[in-house]
Amino acid sequence: MNQTGYKCPKCGNSNYESVEFRVAGGIFSKIFDVQDKKFTTMSCIKCSYNEIYKASKLSIGKYI
């Protein structure tokens, strides 16, 4: 994937995979099984370096 201007800070490669996931954030969200926190990972295809952002894929595209 290469839709944004993302470059790996470790090796400079511009090819990456992006995955979005949700997790439970507090006591009540754990009790009621509600995943209320959204994160996105950016993983370099070449060196496997990963970064995790507390934002959706759409939000990250605006900044990278």
Image (cartoon, grey):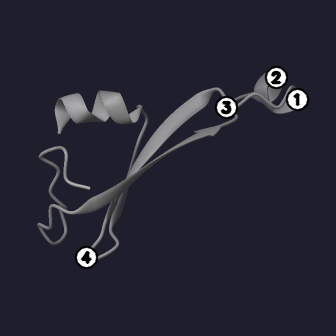
Which numbered disc flags the more N-terminal residue, 2 or 4?
2
Query: Splitting the image into 4 quarters, where does residue 63 fall?
Result: top left
Relative image position of residue 17 (x, y in whole percent) = 35, 58
The residue wearing badge 1 is 31
Q: Say left or right for 13 vs 59.
A: left
Q: Are marks 2 and 3 in contact (CB under 8 Å)?
A: no
Relative image position of residue 28 (x, y in whole percent) = 82, 22
Q: For label 4, count other residues whose C-alpha is less than 10 Å away and answer few (under 14), some (14-19) or many (20+).
A: few
Q: CA distance from mark 3 to mark 1?
A: 11 Å
Q: Are marks 1 and 2 in contact (CB under 8 Å)?
A: yes
29 up-or-down from 53: above or below: above
Q: Secondary structure at mark 3?
A: loop
Q: Secondary structure at mark 2?
A: helix
The residue wearing badge 4 is 46
Name the residue rendered at 12%, 46% in the picture.
5
Numbered tag placed on residue 25 in the rendering:
3
Which residue occupies the foreground of this view, 27 or 3?
Answer: 3
Name the residue rendered at 76%, 27% in the picture.
34
